[in-house]
Amino acid sequence: MENNYQLDPNKWIENYADALYGFCIVRVNNQSIAEDIVQETFLSAWKARETYNAVATEKNWLYAICKNKIIDHYRKKGATITTETEDSDNYFDNEEHWTKEKQPNEWGLNGQTQLEKKEFYQVLANCKQKLKELQQQVFVLKYLEDFDSDQICNLLGISSSNYWVLIHRAKLQLRNCLEKNWIKI
Amino acid sequence: MKLIKQFFMISCKEATYLVSLKEEGKLSFSKYLKLELHLAICILCKRFEIQTGHFCKIAKQHPRKPEAKMSTEKKLAIKTLLEEA
């Protein structure tokens, strides 16, 4: 089947810079890193423009390149970050039961509908930012990019037991942060 | 009773840890049973499972910040780079 998709590099910045930037910032949580990733995306796209085969739209093609750049960024970072040691932040007591202070409270129906709102994503973004870097990365790769645990371990060069600890901590912390800042009980 | 506890009971800490493994189908049968038993009797861990499951799922539905804008300087810089490339 013939496709008529074409590239229009002169309009890339005008058409896609903000959108790609918004896409990156959710994933890397840092303005200058996000901007650099968009820059690399455009440069790589420009170099590869001859190989564009018009199977994907220009937009999807640029997003695919951008996604790869983000993953490259994670891969480079992964190796440099020291992996998680278990720190005590009082979710559980000595018997490994929930502490009163951090136990999950009922969110109720109200909580459910609250989660649908747009503002929720702002709170989630803020909570995500409070995570340790590696926790943030495993969370994004798992729940925004849909990788499975084996792929993420491979990508970041961490062991699987380390991965499960990271995702456990990330969820405990995010849940607690959302409850405190969004779900008003 | 003590024996039953030893064989079948897991702590809340372990249960919440295992919830993520369950999600990917990575639990052995015996771990799976232990987890399900725990979730059946522990309202707090059940809440944890439901709440985290819910926000992890919807985290994906909003893949970018719609209002985010890249700085004009950076756009200009990229433009120059592209022209030189």
Image (cartoon, coloured by chain):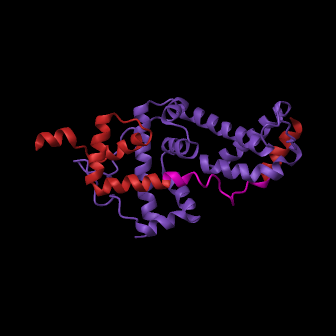
Q: Residue A27 at what x, y percent from top left? A: 60, 47
> Does residue A84 appear in the picture of this structure?
no
Quadrant of the drawing holding the C terminus of chain A: bottom left
Look at the picture and state if A101 lies above or below A13. Answer: below
Look at the picture and state if B67 lies above or below A168. Answer: below
Task: Between residue B43 and residue A63, name the one nearer to us.
Answer: B43
Please report the residue visible at 34 percent of the width from the left and 33 percent of the height from the top.
B28
Q: Residue A87 at what x, y percent from top left? A: 35, 44
Left or right: B27 in relation to B34? right
Task: Between residue B45 and residue A137, name the one nearer to us.
Answer: B45
Left or right: A7 in relation to B13? right
Left or right: B58 in relation to A58? left
> Does residue B66 appear in the picture of this structure?
yes
Magenta span of residues: B56-72
Magenta span: predominant SS is loop
Q: Residue A56 at what x, y percent from top left? A: 77, 40
Please name the color used to draw chain B. red
- Give the image quarter of residue B66: bottom right
In the rendered image, residue A89 lying in the magenta stretch gets the answer no
- Give the image quarter of residue A39: top right
Quadrant of the drawing holding the N terminus of chain A: top right
Name the outermost residue toward the front.
A1
Please report the residue visible at 47 percent of the width from the left and 31 percent of the height from the top.
A158
Mark count: 0
Q: Residue B20 at what x, y percent from top left? A: 41, 43
Name the outermost residue toward the left.
B1
Please report the residue visible at 42 percent of the width from the left and 52 percent of the height from the top.
A173
Task: Between residue B76 and residue A98, name the one nearer to us.
Answer: A98
Please name the color used to draw chain A. purple
In the rendered image, residue B68 lying in the magenta stretch gets the answer yes
Left or right: A20 in relation to B11? right
